[in-house]
Image: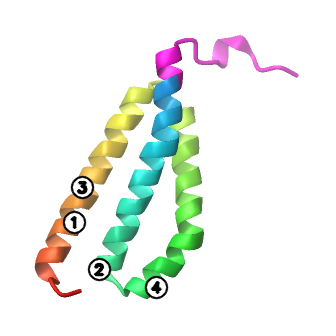
Amino acid sequence: MPANKKHLTKSPMQRFAKISAGFAGGYIVTEALHMVLALWVDASGALITLRFGGFILWAVLLIIAFLARNGWKVWLWYLLVTGLLAIAIYFGKVAYPLA
């Protein structure tokens, strides 16, 4: 049974924004989160968590990008979250410079 046409994205730019936000943006957020985890907790534990939890988080962020109406807003949210995590990485390096 085919999908109802009224629920499909009509704009090719929105389709591109959703696909790229899901794949690339979700991956960037996932990696930034695990970099923060590696700085603030035991790095070996964070790396083991990255194998399974990272894929699950990336898949959830991918689905969220496709559920949103506007792909560019998803990109904005993913970049804001990545920026906040980058600040946490920076302050983690300042607080624990040798870790």
Q: Which residue is identified by label 3? A: 84
Residue type indicated by callout 3: Leu
Q: Which residue is identified by label 2? A: 40
Picture coordinates of residue 85, whole percent (x, y):
27, 60
Placement of 73 over or under 38, stated as above or below: above
Of mark 4 and mark 2, the one earlier in the sequence is: 2
How far apart marks 2 and 3 lie (CA) works out to: 15 Å
How far apart marks 2 and 1 lie (CA) works out to: 9 Å
**SS assignment at label 1:** helix
**SS assignment at label 2:** helix
Placement of the N terminus among the 4 image quadrants? top right
**For discs 3 and 4, the disc positioned in front in the rendered view:** 4
Residue type indicated by callout 2: Trp
Name, please, the residue furthest toward the right. Answer: 1
- Residue 2 among magenta residues: yes
Q: Is 64 on the left or on the right of 79, as rendered?
A: right
Q: Which mark is residue 88?
A: 1
**SS assignment at label 3:** helix
Q: Is 5 on the left or on the right of 1, as rendered?
A: left
Q: Which residue is identified by label 4? A: 45
Residue at image point 40% right, 69% down: 34
How far apart marks 1 and 4 lie (CA) works out to: 19 Å
The magenta-colored residue range is 1-15
Q: Are marks 4 and 2 in contact (CB under 8 Å)?
A: no
